[in-house]
Image (cartoon, helix red, strand yellow):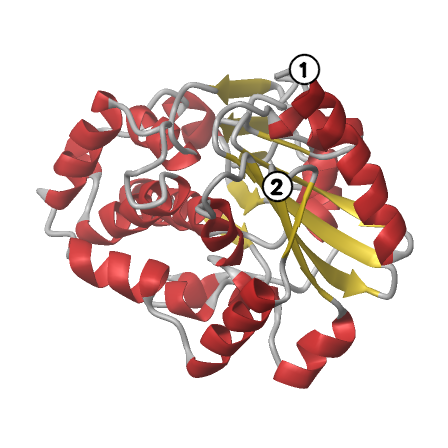
């Protein structure tokens, strides 16, 4: 492992990813947590903690997903803090306080918006499909068990859109093949975590599609959910995965936008591009980040103001095409 010395020297280790974790974040964090528990903790008696809130229910089959901590009241300092799939410290949420006080900090990421400077050591590979792909390269293949492989495979599947996004490379497929050789049940992970939806999730997807709007000469498709509607359907952010991807495949669209209200007048904005527009530029302008084809940010204000501000940024890029 490329940071073997750091792990061996640390008695206490914390692992965390970004707030509202997606498949790549959950897969990377649990993949690393299980890797350290299996290959280091049994030999060196280390204290290893995973901080992660709001793991989607469909990911809870991953080994040790129930070990994730979400109580941040304890005051403590870790010898080593490992950040995964996170481009800046403020994206750690409540776990940021443990990151700030840690003696050593390491980050594994693939987001182009990562400055590469917020940890002592940053392993940043923007051309990789996912943080799970970055992490795989840092591990020893013979030490990757089935539970570790399942977590990494899940992360790669979700950040590549089941290997259909253009971030899928020959290397990505080779790594996926090596993970399959560990016994990973590909169809179970893909169907169970990517395609399968509850009845309520299908209802909310249908509502978002039915009420979506084409704007900017049909080049942008837009949909949103307010807190009132989310409460009406009894859904949480974890139930909204897949909506943005379904919007993106609308014929003639260059950019898909999906917003949902986190708190009164506080919105999570997600964007997906079909290639011509770099949505990371718009996201970074509003304090967020991501990739050329997939990016997002949090925005405060009235819904129509958030939408108007966003569309102004996208209109500028579209005008240059």
Residue at the image position 68 percent from the left and 84 percent from the top:
232
- The answer to whether 107 appears left or right of 129 in the picture is right
Distance, label 2 to label 1, CA atoms, is 16 Å
Instruction: Tell which of 34 and 196 is nearer to you.
Output: 196
Can see residue 46? Answer: no
State whether residue 303 is above or below residue 200: above
Q: Which mark is residue 320?
A: 1
- Circles 2 and 1: CB distance less than 8 Å? no
Mark 2 or 1, closer to the camera: 2
Residue at the image position 46 percent from the left and 57 percent from the top:
242
State whether residue 117 is above or below residue 95: above
Residue 53: horizontal and vertical position, in percent?
A: 59, 61
Residue 176: horizontal and vertical position, in percent?
A: 20, 37
State whether residue 141 is above or below residue 194: above
Q: Tell me the quadrant of the picture where the C terminus can be found.
A: top right
Q: Which mark is residue 218?
A: 2
Residue 179: horizontal and vertical position, in percent?
A: 18, 41
């Amino acid at each position: 492992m490329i940071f073997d010395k750091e792990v061996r020297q640390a008695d206490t280790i914390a692992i965390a990813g970004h707030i509202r974790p997606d498949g790549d974040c959950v897969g990377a964090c649990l993949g690393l947590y299980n890797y350290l528990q299996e290959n280091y903790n049994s030999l060196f008696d280390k204290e290893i903690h995973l901080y992660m809130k709001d793991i989607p229910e469909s990911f809870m089959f991953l080994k040790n997903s129930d070990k994730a901590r979400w109580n941040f009241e304890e005051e403590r300092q870790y010898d080593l803090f490992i950040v995964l799939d996170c481009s800046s410290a403020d994206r750690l949420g409540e776990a940021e306080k443990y990151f700030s006080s840690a003696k050593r900090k390491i980050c594994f990421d693939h987001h182009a918006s990562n400055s590469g400077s917020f940890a002592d050591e940053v392993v940043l590979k923007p051309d990789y499909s996912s943080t799970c792909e970055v992490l795989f390269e840092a591990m020893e293949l013979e030490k990757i068990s089935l539970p570790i492989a399942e977590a990494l495979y899940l992360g790669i599947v979700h950040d590549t859109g089941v290997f259909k996004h253009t971030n899928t490379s020959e290397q990505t497929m080779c790594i996926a093949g090596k993970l399959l050789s560990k016994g990973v049940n590909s169809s179970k992970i893909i169907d169970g975590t990517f395609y399968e939806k509850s009845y309520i999730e299908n209802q909310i997807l249908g509502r978002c599609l039915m009420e979506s709007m084409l704007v900017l000469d049909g080049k942008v498709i837009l949909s949103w959910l307010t807190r009132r509607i989310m409460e009406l359907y009894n859904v949480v952010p974890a139930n909204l995965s897949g909506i943005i991807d379904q919007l993106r495949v609308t014929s003639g669209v260059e950019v898909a936008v999906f917003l949902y209200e986190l708190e009164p007048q506080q919105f999570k904005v997600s964007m997906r591009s079909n290639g011509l527009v770099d949505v990371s530029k718009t996201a970074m302008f509003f304090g967020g980040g991501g990739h050329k084809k997939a990016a997002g940010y949090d925005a405060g204000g009235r819904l129509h103001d958030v939408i108007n501000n966003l569309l102004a940024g996208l209109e500028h890029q579209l005008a240059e095409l």
